[in-house]
Image (tube, rainbow, N blue to C red):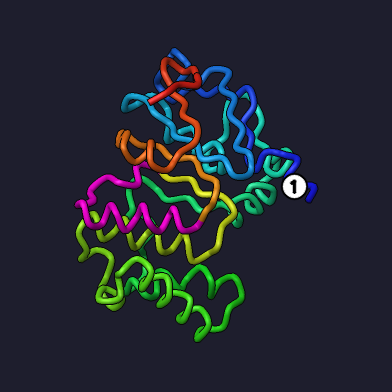
Amino acid sequence: MESALHPLLELRAIHFTATGRSAPLLSDVNLAVMPGQRIGLLGNNGSGKSTLLHIATGLIRPVAGTVSHDGKACSSESDFLSLRLQTGYLLQHAADQLFCTTILEDVAFGPYNQGKSQSEARKLAESMLALLKLEALAHCNGGCLSGGEQKLAALATVLVMQPKLLLLDEPTNDLDPDARERLIAAVEQTGLPLVAIAHDRDFLARLCTHWYCLEQGKLRETTL
């Protein structure tokens, strides 16, 4: 019950300047994700949206500011590891999340490395592939898939871990209408809180409860 009193994820007074840039990419950015909240994040290319998610998961560190998870500030790699284990992060480039010989192995990788037996991990992976209607691709290599198929397969590797929070970076890029609907249905079915970066305003309108725009380093609440 105590964790429900705190934001699942909170970024406070985040400052970040990219290498080679004089102006800050992020300046005094604050964002809190409460249980049940679904946040859509808009902004032009290069505005720092993906950087913000990288900072949120500890993949890069800000110049100043804090990241907190369930009310606890993340100050060490072990703190961020705990956050990552409970956060499903779908990267913008889905191929980066597919590195095994087959898609089935990719999806089973996470559960197996979290202590599931090989047969348990395989069953979980098969169930998740079925949910996303990817059974026919189970024994294909990720590098042989289309961009849309890679995105759905990468989502399967995320959802199979049963995260408490989703971070989605341009989830509908490269998706045809059928694949897009499959992805939306799968995300809706989870009922999980999320932060989604997207230029796809219809996607954000369907899934999100709050919207923010990142512009010139500042984050402000907006409407669609």
Q: Which residue is rendered at x = 25% and y = 60% of the image?
A: 149
- Tell me where the magenta segment starts and ends, as one range: 169-190
Q: Which residue is rendered at x = 51% and y = 44% of the image?
A: 194
Q: Above or below — where is 40 with respect to 104?
A: above
Judging depth in this view, the residue of 101 and 169 nearest the camera is: 169
Q: Residue furthest right?
A: 2
Q: Which residue is mark 1?
A: 3
Q: Which residue is rendered at x = 51% and y = 49% of the image?
A: 166
Q: Residues within 10 Å of mark 1 (few under 14, many from 20)?
A: few
Query: Quadrant location of residue 108?
Result: bottom left
Q: Residue furthest bottom?
A: 119
Judging depth in this view, the residue of 48 and 221 nearest the camera is: 221
Q: Which residue is rendered at x = 42% and y = 15% of the image?
A: 216
- Residue 218 in picture, x, y percent from top left: 49, 17
With 85 as the anchor, is 175 left or right in this view? Answer: left
Q: Secondary structure at mark 1?
A: helix
Is residue 205 a member of the stretch shown in magenta? no
Q: Above or below — where is 55 with respect to 16?
A: below
Query: Quadrant location of residue 68?
Result: top right
With 90 as the anchor, is 137 left or right in this view? Answer: left
- Residue 42 in picture, x, y percent from top left: 39, 28
- Residue 159 in picture, x, y percent from top left: 47, 61
State whether residue 72 appears in this view: no
With 52 as the anchor, is 150 left or right in this view? Answer: left
Q: What's under tag 1, amino acid-wise?
A: Ser
* The C terminus, quarter of image: top left
Judging depth in this view, the residue of 20 and 51 nearest the camera is: 51
Q: Main secondary structure of the magenta part?
A: helix
Is residue 178 a member of the stretch shown in magenta? yes
